[in-house]
Amino acid sequence: MVVIDGAPAGVREDTAARVARRTEQRRRQIALLAEPGGIARADEPVRVATRIDRLSHHYRDIHPIDPAALTAADPAAVTAAVAVLERIIQTNDLLPVGYLEGGAAAARAVGRVVVRDERGRLDGYGTGSLVCPELLLTNHHVLGDAGTAGRSSIEFDYQDGVDGSPRPLQAFPLDPGRFFFADRELDFALVAVKAAPGELARFGFNRLVAPEGKAIVGDFVTIIQHPGGEKKQVALRENRIVDVLESFLHYQTDTEPGSSGSPVFNDQWELVALHHAAVPAPEHDEFGGFINEGVRISRLLDVLRRQPFPPEQRALLDRLLAERMPLPSAPPASTAPSAPPASTNGSMNGSLSRPAEPALGQAPLTLTLTAPVTVHLAGPIAVDGPSMAVPEAIQIDPDYSGRRGYDPDFLPGGHRVALPTLPPDLLSLAAVSRQPGDGQSHVLNYHHFSVVMNRQRRLAFFTAVNIDGPTSLRIRRDPDRWIFDPRLPDSQQTGEDVYRDNPLDRGHLVRRLDPAWGASLAVAKSGNDDTFHFTNCTPQHKDFNQNQTTWAGLEDYILDNADNRDLKVSVFTGPVLAADDDPYRGVQLPRQYWKIVVMVKHDGGLSATGYLLSQDHLIDGLEAVPGEFSYGAYKTYQVPIRRIEDLTRLSFGTLADADPLARMEVATTAREITHLRQLTL
């Protein structure tokens, strides 16, 4: 088989079938993109909100938008989304000069794959990109097996320089014996490159980023490629995403189809897809009559994470998932702040430096803080302190003696909100710390939050966190690194074995950003990192945990929109540990979760509201068909605190008296919440 700028028949047929099935959907989306403000309506509201949230990591004056508000077509939310997307995405091709610098860095890691047959003869070409210091990503139909990879090589700098002269070619053999994995369904291959230590460093790498939000319908993409095995070329922002499928992106083009294995980037130079096919689409003559298809990077990473690699290969893969390497020409962090956006929830004073999120193997994010800054929770950085640079990788301090935990006197106005109490029979099941401090031995203290564990169920009875809106810091999420809490035996915690090779996610009880606040960046980061203890983790079906729901935005909404004094809240969260919860791998999986949010209103009165969320139908049949999960609906309810006390047998003291539902003339048992504006506070 000759691989020159074209996918084999089977890949083209599958791609053509997907393109044909989505014709009407794609036409509607393209039509919306041509309408004023249509870019905010051409894709699903949740995906649009997630895209804006990710853009907020790159542009300091962009703020996340409530996905529930977009789903409900709230006029203010839609207007805000249109303003962001039209400015950042639907631009008139006037881009910052930094866009070209990012492209030059991305292009260095892209090379021509030279494929040879069993007799060593040239069999064709493809395109590949380094995605960590030693691993190359291309298509399965370019390198379909280890034997083919072992006979093939990668050539960097097969291109002309600025003066038009060819640059010296840099060729390296591939090393499938060290690492090789290929997936036919998603048409990707990952293989090690054979080189001396540090020899590939000059090329950098294009880091694979797992989180959602990198691309939506309407985003422009850039493809760096070796079309037909020719010298390196770039389809510079001439491709536009017209459809987003579960595992693939479709993008229009008015150029010839790109090379197999080419990396597809968004305008922030994040790798969003792996190009693998182009098929005729006569219904789209307006842009060349072709639809290109690329494999979504997030889905590709899902497959890799599920594979049982041997230890040596797992170590290489971990580097791909987590490592960053400075590029030779990485520019220093800028220190010139832009004018802060208007905010009704806070003010910004002083100067702030926040360079864009690294996406191309750049050095860790550096934050330069030169004066006190105060902004609301969902906005940019909010800290007070001297200049500092803190790496973003999760780093958990092994000394637990300095963690003060949840503060019952945190709220203003002298309101003391104590931890929930357990009845004697449940207290006897509480895990006891092997390193007790001055407080109760069954309360595990972390930075700004505490956890009480049920040693029998190996899950938390409850968590308690203080959230300080004015000094909260939005810390970008790096690859997860969950650890056991050394103060408890591992056998009393639910660890990695429960989450392996299935659709269960490690669900945070205390959201990672809730305790990320304080007088310095280091303090805020300590709170963020502490949330990655298994004691703060509960098994949640991926469709429950990864989708945006009203549940996810409760704390933010109350901080930013409620009649909240000092923008502070205390939050209690936990699973409903029912006796009939279904067992799975030695752990009973909770079907429901509860939350109580406490704040002080401007009139000085205390308000405490309770919420319940269920994933009951999501885990039906778990043991009946191992590894398969049923999908079902989930809903958020506002419920009386008394009901949560009945379900959990926890006592919240006098909080029920501060519950607005308890003060209503007509008794309320549960109220479904489909939009956060429905909350009774």
Image (cartoon, grey):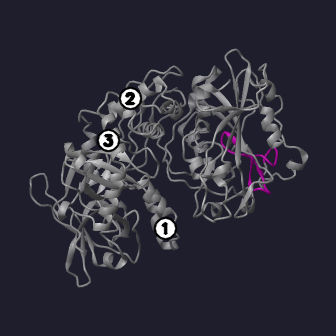
Q: What label does residue 82 carry, if any?
A: 2
Q: Earlier in the sequence, mark 3 or mark 1?
A: 3
As measured in the structure, the alpha-carbon distance from the residue carrying label 2 to the one carrying label 1 is 43 Å
Residue at mark 3:
27
Instruction: Check if mark 3's residue and mark 1's residue have beta carbons within 8 Å.
Output: no
Residue ranking furthest to the right: 424
Q: Is residue 611 left or right of residue 383?
A: right
Is 560 positioned to the left or the right of 31 in the image?
right
Q: Residues within 10 Å of mark 1 (few under 14, many from 20)?
A: few
| Element at label 2 | helix
| Mark closer to the observer (3, 2) | 3
Classify 10 Å Cα crowding around label 3: few (below 14), some (14-19), many (20 and above): some
Image spot of residue 387 (x, y percent)? 47, 36
Q: Give the CA separation, mark 3 to mark 2.
A: 20 Å
Q: Nearer the viewer, residue 264 or 45?
A: 45
The quadrant in which residue 14 appears is bottom left
- Residue kind at label 2, given as amino acid type: Val
- Amino acid type of disc 3? Arg
In front of the other: 342 or 86: 86
* Location of residue 202 by image quarter: bottom left
The C terminus lies in which quarter of the figure? top right
Viewer-side label of 2, 1 = 2
Determine which of the numbered discs, if any, sits on residue 315 in the image: 1
Give the x, y percent position of residue 662.
79, 25
Q: Is residue 221 above or below residue 485?
A: above
- Where residue 13 is drawn, which disc sits there? none
